[in-house]
Image: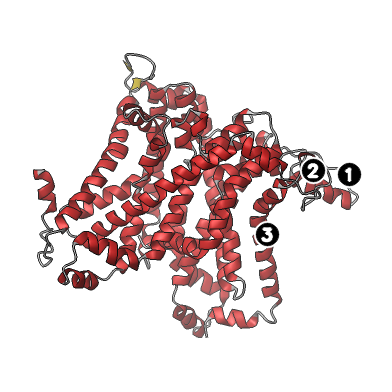
Amino acid sequence: MAFLSRLLRPEAASPHRIRLAGQNAMIAGAIVLAAAYFLIWTVFPFIYTFIYSFFDWQPLRPTQEFLGLDNYAEALFKDQRFWLAMGNSFEFAFGNVVLGTVICLLVAVMINSVKRFQAFLRASYFMPTVTGMVAVALVWEFIYQPRFGILNTSIFATADFLNLPPPPEIGWLTRPQHAMNSLILFGFWKFLGVRMIILLAGLQNIPQTYYEAAQIDGAGARASFFRITLPLLMPALSFVVVVGVINSLQVFVPMYVMTAGGPLFSTTTVVLLLYEKTFQLFRFGYGAAISFILFGIIMLMTFVQLRFLRSSWDIGA
Amino acid sequence: MTTATARRIRLRIDPGAVLLYLLLFIGAFAMLFPVLWMGMSTFKAEAEISQYPPSFLPKTFTLEPLIAAWTKIKFGRYFMNSLLVTGVATPLSVLTSAYLGFVWNKYDFRFKEPMFYVIIATMMIPGPMLLIPHYQVVLWANLLNTYASIIVPAVVTPYGIFLMRQFMHSVPNELLDAGRIDGASEPRLFVFVALPLVPSSLAALGIIQFLANWDNLLWPLVVLTNTAKYTLAVGLATFAAEYERNFAVQNAGAFIAVFPVVIAFLLFQRQIIRGIALTGLKG
């Protein structure tokens, strides 16, 4: 309690604020609540995972064997599946972030420039965001189904209509060369809305006077876009990219539901591998090592992006 | 005149504007199509779903897949479980977020900023990484296979604290001081002065948390092994993974999961969109 009461003393930097009687209780309550949650649910688990990533940790055994760095070595140097999964995660993240951000930027700029139906268009593009991931993953699986999925049957019907020879059934999710791309398309559809709303808010924060000044100076639409819109949108844009990379490297549900990592391992991401090793093979220690490597990579990616995008965070932020 | 208004005036005559609207509406249709298709397929018989050529509207309207999903595969039960878990966790998490956000915005105390940065930093830890120790904590607390194991961890969220701290800026300190002069206690100020001033923020956070809880798969999948406790997301995922495929029933199950959320979205779409836009930028 002594520690808590020390915490409750006002900051030296703001002596002008008077602490009233009831405030200590409010602050103490908040700190206790936050500390309880974060110590039990974040700090402890974080340390726990880190320690057990050095053990051959299997929950059903009475004693756990210390392995040193063996789990990490196995993932990095022996387990080929780990690198395949890492490659798949990056393939998804790259497709999802690049395709997602570029097309999303176009859509946001287009919606921002129209006068009528803006609310309807915004709501339509946002709609997939509010649908449950598992449910819509199943719906897309149904759409991708080779024989009677609407995607292929539309192709068949179009070919029929044009009197073309019947096209082959495309295994959107069942051919290794298509499966990841189909998942990227699904991710694009699912995540477009959030990104678009953030970019739209960013676009609407750009003062109109800048465009007026540019127009007086004789700038055309293209110059206005590249010299005003794009630089001033960078805080929003870099937020979308950084968060997009963090989230898409952790993607799990679409693969779990639609492909279960197949065909031929082509859609197994690191998180799916981690889930399999941990909760199906019960190799908790190895799973912990994989998750720490993933954490390190995500931190590194975030750090590099923030360094790279730092100047753009500061402008107008 | 701004370029935006200049563009708007040109719309009337510019063929480019027609193309713009055309592209936007085709895009909007593509975005809406999967959900519409799911809705239409829900009321089709099993045979019609796989027929060629495909039909958009159901030729013969049937409730069979919906009834089958609701009863045979216990989707009704899963739905109620989801409703219970989401219905308890969401208001609680909004309340704790508002409380912690209020304290972190309106009071001064030692290590206020560092503690806040720690809270923000926890948002960067990938969720799946802590799955194993979370499981261990729940095991120690003897809460495996309980609703509490899903609800309790969702009651405090760093995201919500961050969001509400930003929104509490809009509560004027002068108003709180006026309340203090009138002798109101601090909890009273929080409940009767601060909260009524930020209703749309509370609604936005509520919706965001509702969606997160409703959509949560990985964690319930790990802690729930008793099928009677399954949430809709877990029920749907395991149904799709284990059983002989019946697309009609599966689709009807997806419809049950998506329908209430889409209705909620249509009712609150302004708050949702604003809430999400604000979290993105005011960091």
Circle 2 sits on which residue?
Answer: B48
Q: Residue at x 64, y 29 (%)?
A: B243
Q: Amino acid at mark 3?
A: Phe
User: Would residue A116 be visible to someone looking at this image?
Assistant: yes
Q: Amino acid at mark 1?
A: Pro
Circle 1 sits on which residue?
Answer: A165
Circle 3 sits on which residue?
Answer: B29
The disc label shown at residue B228, or none: none
* Percent coordinates x, y for residue A232 in the rendering: 44, 68
Q: In the image, is residue B231 above or below residue A5?
A: above
* Percent coordinates x, y for residue B65 in the rendering: 70, 41
Residue furthest to the right: A163
Residue placed most toward the observer, A70 or B263? B263
Q: Chain of mark 2?
A: B
Q: Are marks 1 and 2 on the same chain?
A: no
Which mark is nearer the camera, 1 or 2? Answer: 2
